[in-house]
Image: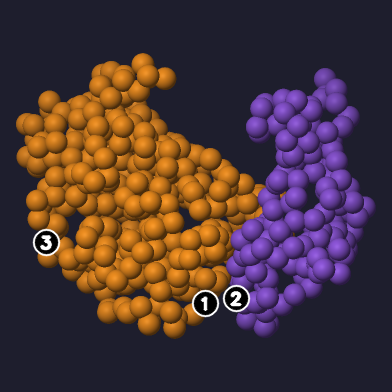
Amino acid sequence: MSNPSTEPGVLARHQAELDRGRWLIQRCGACHRAVYFPRELCPHCGHLGLAWEAPSGLGTVHAVTTVKRKPADGGDLDVCLVELDEGVRLMSRVENRPPAEVRIGLRVRARVRVDEGRGLVVFDAVDERASA
Amino acid sequence: MTTTRETLKSLRGRTAIVGAATFGCGECPGHTDMEMLAKAAHAAVADAGLTMADIDGLATASVSAVMWPLGVVEYLGLNPRYIDGTMLGGSSFVAHLLPAMQALHFGQCNAVLVCYGSAQKSSTFGRKEIVGLRPFLDPQPYEHPYQPQLPVSAYALAASRHMHAFGTTREQLADVAVAARAWARLNPEAYLREPLTRADVLASRMVSDPLTVRDCCPVTDGAGAFVLVRAERARDLPKKPVYVLGNATAVWNRQVSSMPELTVTAARQSGAEAFAMAGLTPAEIDIVQLYDAFTINTILFLEDLGFCAKGEGGAFVADGAIAPGGRLPVNTNGGGLSCVHPGMYGVFTVIEAVRQLRGEAGARQVLGANTAVAHGNGGMLSSQSTAVLGTADTL
């Protein structure tokens, strides 16, 4: 007998939503902590019931590096870790600043970019004064 | 938990490293991983005053072959009663200690060979190809799309956070590489031996900032092996035994993006448990061998193992403090940064500690060294294994 579950795994589900331009993280129904990357069970308490939720999208650059590349290979590339206001961290990049201007502490907002049908979470620096 | 810890403590000093050897450190063209491993293994067994027929326990790991221990058994003609193929990245060969100590203690086997070999600098299918295959064989779907240059970018991210949180400087990172090179210049086996200054490191090519090419270990060939037996047998063998006083391993994450805190590694746990088992404190350690694939490693591990407070690692390593003649001898062979780094370096931390504690380290010998820490790191600051070793004076 095949797998009785017709639901895809969480990685496929997460990617399918990204491909439609929507980013989802998870929250545990038992310990209520946010979870990312997506899991089949809560890494904090072991509970199976993780619910999907749309994050606020706001976060802060937590760590940053510029990968030095030749112009022919695409030039310098920002790689950073962003801590979401929900309390989870992920690898990403900030796209609306040159890599050298992406600093720890920079406030950023998530955006899903879809290239050739495949979604990816990236971030843009936000001007907090303008949005206040 | 107390009972468990007390039971582990009873293994303190019950096994000893009686043979150790390296082969092909640096460049070893024309050899396979297995050929290099075999030569290091035979040399370590001979160093122990044993023959291959005496080996009835095996611990080994490979960066590329998924069933590596099977091939090692076949190639060396072993019939081991104890086999450990645990693969935790570069810390593996330090992490292989405690299970081997248990197997020896309970009589499962009588002599364990821990061994590694890699021709990744000289082989046609080398590091570049292995790195290129990783997204397929070992996918990290939440990191690879952002094209970090792994592993260096992961360590660079940790370095950026350490600099931000504690004011650690690129000069302090550079001083780690300079100290490693100063030790390497005393070690004829080291791969990189030309003089290196802080200015050289700062001016070298940036790879993934703040880490330059001189903040990174080179890719080399190299093989290493050591032999463990029960302490009572060790006393009858030719070389001065090096006793295993404590060992512990901890893993908190795989990807750098999943590190609980970027400035704290699982070495805090492995170190505390290994020191507790050994009944020693960092202040009582004479020499320290740390897995320094990148300069930030040395700073993080000195902090996490308790040689200095969190955040003070940069100041602790600065201005030659861990170089020859400094306050604490660290990576006395030249480390992964200057001596040898064939993909996984952990086995060499143990071998250099053994050579120092035996008094065999030649021009780089730390006089009167009786205690040592050998610390392995694996993955992206992921797996950490700490061993505390000592001479008969520490029993």
Residue under circle 3? B362
Within 10 Å of disc 3 (Cα), the crowding (few <14, some 14-19, many 20+) is few
Tell me residue A93's x, y (percent).
Answer: 72, 64
Q: Assign a secondary structure to mark 3.
A: helix
Query: For the residues carrying marks 3 and 1, which lies nearer the camera in this image?
Result: 1
Instruction: Calculate the distance from the C-alpha at mark 2 to the C-alpha at mark 1.
Output: 7 Å
Whether pointer 2 and pointer 3 mark residues with C-beta atoms closer than 8 Å, the reply is no
Image quarter for residue B231? top left
The colour one sees for chain B in the rendered image is: orange
Q: How many marks?
A: 3
Horizontal side, residue A126 vs residue B106: left or right: right
Instruction: Please state which amino acid type lies under the numbered disc 1.
Output: Met
Q: Quadrant of the C terminus of chain B?
A: top left
Q: Quadrant of the N terminus of chain B?
A: top left
Whether pointer 2 and pointer 1 mark residues with C-beta atoms closer than 8 Å, the reply is yes
Q: How is the image coloured?
A: by chain
Badge 1: chain ID: B
Between residue B194 and residue B330, name the one nearer to us. B330
Task: Name the residue: 78% across, 68% down.
Answer: A125
Q: Assign a secondary structure to mark 1.
A: strand
Task: Name the residue: 27% across, 58% down.
Answer: B330
Within 10 Å of disc 1 (Cα), the crowding (few <14, some 14-19, many 20+) is some
